[in-house]
Amino acid sequence: MRERLPLWLQDSCAVRPRAVAAVGVVLICAVGFAGQQYWSARPRALTVPAVVAPGALPAAATAPAAAPAQGAGAGAGGVGGTAARIVVDVTGKVRDPGVRRLPAGSRVEDALAAAGGVRPGADTTGLNRARVLVDGEQVVVGAPAQPPPAGMAGGMGPASGAGSGLGPGSGPLSLGSATVAQLDGLPGVGPVLAQHIVDFRTARGGFRSVEDLRQVDGIGERRFADLRPLVRP
């Protein structure tokens, strides 16, 4: 039957080795690609992580979190410790007299530095610059040294080392160096009036005479008459 077919048809239907090889290569590539797709799409088993209770965590895992908390607490304590302040009145022969707020544990030298330093030529004899200050005391620079007030042995009370006012019963109280607490002990003088006296002294640079006490707000003629024999400039 093949011999009866036309020559062009016989030539088209002829099977040549080159054609067989080409078809074979195409089939091999198709089979390989199909196998690769099948292998990639195959189902896989997944491992679910185990649930760990909070109490079962190792100590090493919780230590870093605990350490910052302890550090923060220590820092807060440090801030609280350094936040303590004292208030002192620095007056006399300093460049910038007035009330100063200093850290607790400050010394007389720190108060002088906060007031701008001692003026040239000021007499600081008897002024203990290394003494620790206490809240509410007054540091007077340039006034004659006075003995400490009664009940304040060693001069460690609120009075300064130089120019402290005298205590009750030991002579007239110095208006130029007395503290608010000392002035409060005078008859008819309370904490408010004592502060007015200190403010007047700070603003005017001291008392030139006892008569200047009349100019303090809250002191009338009768009160001045009671205070005059008990105080001095």
Image (cartoon, rainbow, N blue to C red):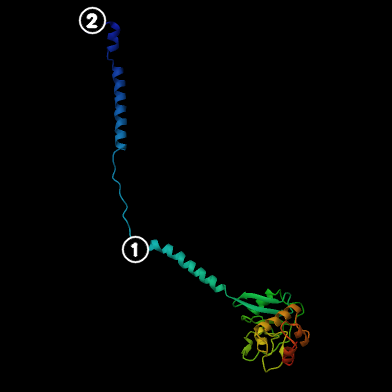
> Residue 170: x percent and y percent?
68, 94
Task: Check the image and name the residue furthest to the bottom.
Answer: 169
Residue visible at 44% across and 65% down in the picture = 67
Residue visible at 64% across and 87% down in the picture = 155
Q: Which mark is residue 87?
A: none
> Residue 46: x percent and y percent?
30, 46
Amino acid of disc 1: Gly
Amino acid of disc 2: Arg
Q: Quadrant of residue 150?
A: bottom right
Establish if 59 lies above or below 89: above
Marks 1 and 2: in contact by CB < 8 Å?
no
Establish if 51 lies above or below 231: above
> Residue 200: x percent and y percent?
73, 80
Q: Quadrant of residue 173?
A: bottom right
Element carrying mark 2: helix
Residue visible at 40% across and 63% down in the picture = 62
